[in-house]
Image (tube, grey):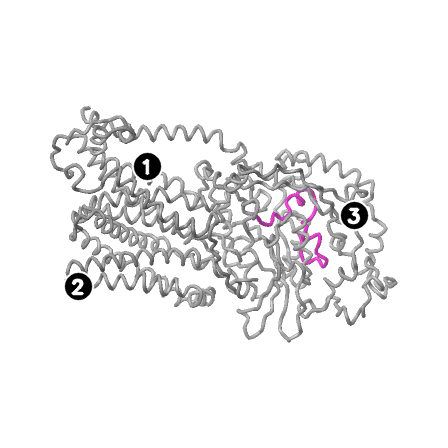
Amino acid sequence: MSGVEGFMYPNEIALQWSVLIVLYPYITGLVAGAFILASLERVFLVEAVKPTYRLALLTALAFLLVAPLPLCLHLGHPFRSPEMYFTPHSTSAMAMFGYVYLWYLMAVLVLEIWLDYRRDIVLLSQSSKGLLRLIYKVMTLGSSNISPRSLAIDERVGWIVTLIGIPSAFLLHGYVGFIFGSIKANPWWSSPLMPVVFIFSAMVSGIAGVMVLYMAITKLRKQKIDMRCVDTIAMYLFYIFIIDFSLEMLDLIHRIYEADESFRSLNFLVHTQLYIPHIVIQIFLGTITPIILLGITQVVKLPEIARKRIYSVSGCLTLIGVFAMRWNVVIGGQLFSKSFLGYTTYKMSLVTREGLLVAIFLTILPLIFLWALVKLLPPWPEKSAPPRGYPVAAAD
Amino acid sequence: MNISRRQVMVLLPAAAVAWKYVLAGTPEASPNYKMSEHWWSMLIDIPKCIGCGNCVRACQTENDVPDGNFRTWVERYHVSDENMTNPTVISPDGGKEGFPVATEDGEKYFFVPKLCNHCADSPCTQVCPVGATFISPDGVVLVDPKYCLGCAYCVQACPYGCRYIHPVKKVADKCTLCYHRITQGLTTACCEACPTGARQLADLKNPKDPIHEFLKTHSVQVLKPQMATGAKVFYNDLDGSVR
Amino acid sequence: MSGFKDAGHLFRFAGLFVLAFAVFLVVRHYVVPKSFGQYGHYRGAAIGEIAAHPAKFAGHESCEGCHSDVQEVKMKGKHAHVNCEACHGALIQRLPAAPQPAPNLYRRLLALVIPPMPVESTFVRHADDPGSVIPPLPDTAVLCVRCHTASAAKPKGFPQVDPAEHAQGLACGSCHKPHDPGMNAGGAK
């Protein structure tokens, strides 16, 4: 049989979960990470990262809107997916997707964005024309109350929402880690560390993603990048990266040390088919290199231009590295036989429903959504209402 | 035992009447079959299997199993005494047309037929997000093709590799222990076709079933016992090298 | 109380949730299949639907009902416990499927998202209507070697030969009677 080495159970030869299932945790990881960055300012009062606060929320929303698409496209019967809402099976981690997603979308992200932008939305509903005016009017939910007291209430409620949003973000992405981590049949996946590793690599990817987006969009808008903001983000990225790397190394070392019955098979896999995706891309290019680069900026005082370059390169390498991590978990876990006697290959198709073109499209789509959101709800400090906590001036 | 032509003429309409209840979706109401009286399992006698592939072919015929997927299959093990943890295993087209002739080389060979183990604590039913796969009250793990989403989570969760996604129906599929046969007093297609009696359907709730005596007097194992799946397919004389 | 006046927009947002939840409950009542939860977290009617599939293999007892003469011969020989259909197969004749509507563009697009259910093939069985399905006589030259070709992998006690050496070009049926194949006890031809 082509592509098979050794022995595989006959039904295992073709992979079940394709590149779309690699994309899904990557996307929700970006959502969770972007939200954590936003919460740094809102809850932990790291004022330096304020310029990215609104952008981080819009980024999270743009990616969250795309998140169900790879799942639906992968299902054999996408139109039966409402069954997950009507009859969720309480013993299945996957069943909580519908409710966790809806909770996070509506009760956390949309609510927080709405509360933070409400003053702008009301003002824009009064100053716009045509279709846009209608859209803004609908978004006000019919209330044009932007008195100081109402905004103060928004502020307080928004703080609570963000506070609840942090564990919600962990749940949104952590449950994906549990989906893999709880499968005793697959030793590459089965581990209590899996949800934790997923969450920390999500934070790393989300923070790096917002950092790169902020720098790129600000450059495109020909504005000045707030270096204090970006330096602070890079610092948090560095420290969270250390934790993430430690967790991944712990899993690896533990696996090598215990060397259980699956070890010989997995070890062979990592040295052959997974060598480039795992060792080269995920570990060296995607983790160690950005950590070293960011580490340099933490100990040596470099000029602004050097820091910008390092942050851009590290951010991009991180994003690639975290994608590789998802790939290695999802695809890697299906490349070896559960008999530990053989291996298969993943033949990614090009133009089918689960092929490469669809995957590329789904990676670009959130950026298109983000563009639309940025146009609809500008996140830039110089364009929005005066900062929170300040007395509100008359509408301009 | 011999059933005469006359007896068949009587039994068939009675079965048809019972059938009406089964068709109505309430096998419980069928006068001849009560789910609560059965707890189905299977016994595989390794020393008797000759690797003829009859079972694989019969299953494919009976259940319209698509080519390239297998509800049951046979593996051939070639084990050297110096390296028991690394056997050579083949299963050409699931063993459907038998196996190539093995040359005598002084090492151990045997055949292992495999199928869904109809686990009492099945990990596959645990992970189904919507309740499309389940264990019936009489111990058979089934898939509801009208409810299944085709997410393949159950396929990932099965430690034995017995599930697949049907290429046309796009739902999960696997051995049903020929539920449509065993509920009307027949045996499974694979057991019917096995020429040596290596495969035997067993009903653990039936006190007269020969499996009770067999389990008491033979060394019997299930596959991957460390997974604690409550597997109900019992293997006689299963070698330690079997994965 | 005045606090609520300035929080009116929050109640509107919450109101959306309540409305959506109410709609969800109503839809759920109509959409979830009635037999769901009957025996467990699944559609109870599925059990009956699966059990209702027509069986293809008739089972040896069904064959013996009509072919008791063959059964008497087989009972005495080495193939006593080899079921009839193990060699003769399922003995069914599949009937032509109902004509499917032509695949126009709409159906092809729909098939991308909703997989069309394959039509269950119908068939007639020799066991139900012997005249409708005339079973082909198995070719012993092909049938017997599947089990009886010697291989180091087969159990040592199982009767096996090298077909080329043993039969020297003859079909197995030239010397062995399939229903009672032993050469010594009256099975020889």
**Mark 2 Cα shell of 10 Å, populated few (<14), some (14-19), many (≥20):** few
Q: Pick the residue in front: C88 or C164.
A: C164
B153 is higher (above) or lower (below) than B241: above
Q: Distance of mark 2 from mark 1, alpha carbons?
A: 42 Å
Residue beneath disc 2: A299
Q: What residue type is labelled 1?
A: Met
Q: Disc number at residue C63? A: 3
| Subunit ID for the residue under disc 1 | A
Answer whether residue A132 is magenta in the image. Answer: no
Q: At 60% from the left edge and 42% from the top edge, which residue is drawn?
A: C118
Q: Which amino acid does label 3 sit on?
A: Cys
Quick check: can you spot residue C40? no
Helix, strand or loop at mark 1: helix
Q: What residue span does the magenta drawing correspond to?
A: B173-201
Q: Distance of mark 3 from mark 2, alpha carbons?
A: 87 Å
Image coordinates for residue B216, horizontal then vertical, percent: 63, 58
Residue beneath disc 1: A106
A278 is higher (above) or lower (below) than C117: below
Q: What residue type is labelled 2?
A: Val
Q: Pick the residue in front: A83 or C119.
A: C119
Helix, strand or loop at mark 3: helix
Q: At 24% from the left edge and 55% from the top edge, which residue is drawn?
A: A237
Q: Quadrant of the N terminus of chain A?
A: bottom right
Q: In which quarter of the image is the C terminus of chain A?
A: top left
Q: In this view, does C38 lie to the left or right of A370?
A: right
